[in-house]
Amino acid sequence: MLAKGGIITAEVFERWDELPDAELHLIELEAGDMHENEAGQRVSGAVSGLGISIDGPYNSRFNLNSAQRGLLIVDAERVHALNAVGQLSLFTRFTDQAVVEGQTVAGVKATPIVVPTSEVERIEAIANGKDDPIVDVLPFVARDAAVVATESLHPRLRESFEARVCEKLAWYGSGDCTFAYVDADREQVAQAIEAAFDDGAGLVMAAGGNTLDPLDPILLSLPQIGASMVHFGAPADPGSMFWVAERGGKPIFNLASCSMYSEATVIDLMLPLVFAGRRITPDDVRRLGYGGLLEDDMTFRFPNYDA
């Protein structure tokens, strides 16, 4: 009937005799005080973008849930600044993670039952409005994708490879997924990539190349089609042989052999960025190093393709 932080109302007085025999500690709000639930509600609203729905309170905690499948964006510096203000806390998942609708991505909680109104106002100033939220989920936008492969695959392996790639792309709402198998020849690779972009592909993945070979036909084809290398190699494992190039604002990913068969690798951390509309930069790849030891206990970083 009367939980921690409960407010004494007329109804509570009417049922006062039902309370267990116990000592009650009461707090009377004064000017400049705010109840934990009101404070949590205001802070939750201040830090959340349009891709967030707010749920709660549950024991003074408000949950920030993803309102859609998309890319979680968290401004870590402002999370730290907010938590330095005082007695209100914001805790989140890591930024740049793919999340699904209804998934809890952050929480807001007041430590004491009553907090100073001034702290809430300082946090609202840090949050700086909906145009620049601290926590948000950007929706994935469907785009057609194409795979150009130079590696000879047995028909049975080719079938499983295509099924796995299409399954992952469909998770983001990819409208179409096509495959072209060509000889390990620079001209043929260049023509296949050109054809994929001409057919409307917003993303091309190149499979079967040898990143360690400077004469690899896939690498040699890039300048021929007017593509430029964005970043070569990745500070992560598996997936250190990853590279990303760009042509006309559209990415070309290296789908290394391990990417063909392994459950998750660097490309699974890059695809959410692309489908959320981000133009991949060298820093996007370099930032993978923190948390880039992609072993079994790091699976939480990857999209839940079964969702």
Image (spheres, grey):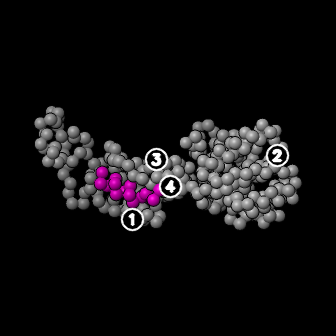
Dot 3 falls on a residue whose secondary structure is: loop
SS of the residue at dot 2?
loop
Q: Residue 9, image x and y in percent?
A: 17, 48
Label 3 vs label 4, nearer the camera: 3
Task: Answer with mark 3 or mark 4, whichever residue precedes in sequence.
Answer: 3
Magenta stretch holds residue 224: no
The structure residue drawn at horizontal position 26% and vertical position 56%, both measured from the top left corner, is 34
Residue 48 shown in magenta: yes
The main secondary structure of the magenta stretch is: helix
Q: CA distance from mark 1 to mark 3?
A: 28 Å
Judging by the rendered image, the residue that carries numbered circle 4 is: 137
Residue type for callout 4: Val
Nearer the N terminus, badge 4 or badge 2? 4
Label ID, residue 50: none
Amino acid on which disc 2 is placed: Glu
Tell me where residue 109 appears, x and y as whole percent.
36, 49
Q: Amino acid at mark 1?
A: Ala
The disc at residue 151 is 2
Asked if disc 2 and disc 1 are in contact, CB closer than 8 Å, the reply is: no
Residue under label 3: 102
Disc 3: CA contacts within 10 A as few (<14), some (14-19) or many (>=20)? some
Disc 3 residue type (three-letter): Gly
Pointer 2 local density, CA inside 10 Å: few below 14, some 14–19, many at least 20: some
Front residue of 89 and 248? 248
Dot 1 or dot 3, earlier in sequence? 3
Q: Which residue is mark 1?
A: 125
What are the residue bounds of the magenta stretch?
37-51
